[in-house]
Image (cartoon, helix red, strand yellow):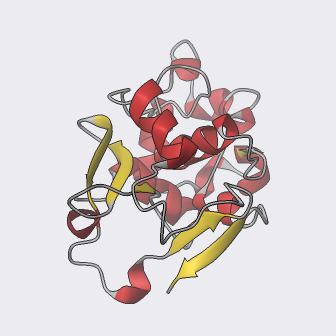
């Protein structure tokens, strides 16, 4: 597994701790992770394959505090939970969202976790406007800027700077940090 280029660009631009996020689910072969792949879109893989090559300090596991207060890991070992069910049953195979738009049938990493939690009745913070996270387009990672320059909002703009003002700067996005800082997640590993 490799981190999506766009996830890594967002991480670099916004100085986030984590680039990607996945949703854990049990399976008879061991834990699996539902995530957004650059080529396959919303897909899943074995946890071991997802974290292969990472050291213990390069990933963490968080669990929504209010996901299911009656969940018992000793007896419910095969219960996927509403977040994984949404990702696998409703949006599995949906493409990667390089436009960072909600409701367009595509997903980026943090958006998949955010919308899966919303489907379970859990609010993992609020999306944040890019202009709140960055004070100017000059602070964008060059690759992330290039991705945003190709945004459909910029298609008819004279320059990216004019597209940034009033268009791209107002994109509301979810980040891995905003998910964690929502107060709705508890760290369970490490």
Q: Name the residue: 47% across, 58% down.
A: 21
Q: Which residue is most to the front? A: 75
Compared to residue 168, the image places residue 141 above or below, namely below
Instruction: Give the quarter of the image for residue 185.
Output: bottom right
Residue at horizontal 75 percent and vertical 62 percent from the top = 184
| Residue at point 65%, 33% (across, down) | 168
Query: Farthest residue in the top direction?
Result: 156
Q: Could you tell me residue 183's position as x and y percent?
A: 79, 66
- Along the horizontal axis of the image, is 66 left or right of 13? right
Q: Nearer the viewer, residue 186 or 144?
A: 186
Task: Tell me what residue is drawn at x 49 percent, y 65 percent.
Answer: 12
Residue sitting nearer the eye, 134 or 54:
54
Give x and y (percent) for residue 162: 67, 28
The answer to whether any part of residue 15 appears in the image is no
Is residue 186 visible to us here? Answer: yes
- 143 over 176 or under it: above or below: above
Q: Nearer the viewer, residue 42 or 17?
A: 42
Residue 52 pos. (x, y %): 21, 73
- Residue 35, x across and y down, in percent: 38, 48
In the rendered image, which quarter is residue 78 located in?
Answer: bottom left
Q: Quadrant of the N terminus?
A: bottom left
User: Is 130 on the left or on the right of 60, as rendered?
Assistant: right
């Amino acid at each position: 597994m490799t981190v999506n280029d766009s996830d890594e660009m967002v991480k670099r631009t916004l100085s986030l701790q984590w680039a990607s996020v996945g949703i854990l689910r049990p399976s008879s072969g061991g834990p699996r992770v539902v995530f957004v792949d650059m080529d396959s879109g919303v897909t899943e893989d074995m946890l071991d394959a997802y974290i292969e090559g990472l050291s213990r300090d390069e990933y963490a596991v968080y669990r929504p505090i209010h996901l299911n207060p009656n969940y018992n890991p000793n007896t419910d070992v095969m219960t996927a939970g509403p977040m994984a069910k949404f990702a696998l049953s409703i949006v599995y195979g949906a493409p990667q969202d390089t436009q960072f738009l909600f409701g367009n049938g595509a997903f980026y990493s943090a958006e998949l976790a955010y919308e899966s939690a919303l489907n379970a009745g859990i609010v993992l913070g609020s999306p944040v406007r890019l202009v709140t996270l960055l004070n100017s387009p000059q602070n964008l990672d060059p690759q992330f800027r290039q991705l945003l320059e190709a945004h459909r909002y910029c298609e008819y703009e004279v320059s990216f700077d004019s597209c940034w003002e009033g268009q791209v700067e107002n994109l509301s996005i979810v980040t891995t940090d905003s998910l964690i800082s929502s107060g709705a997640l508890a760290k369970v590993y490490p």
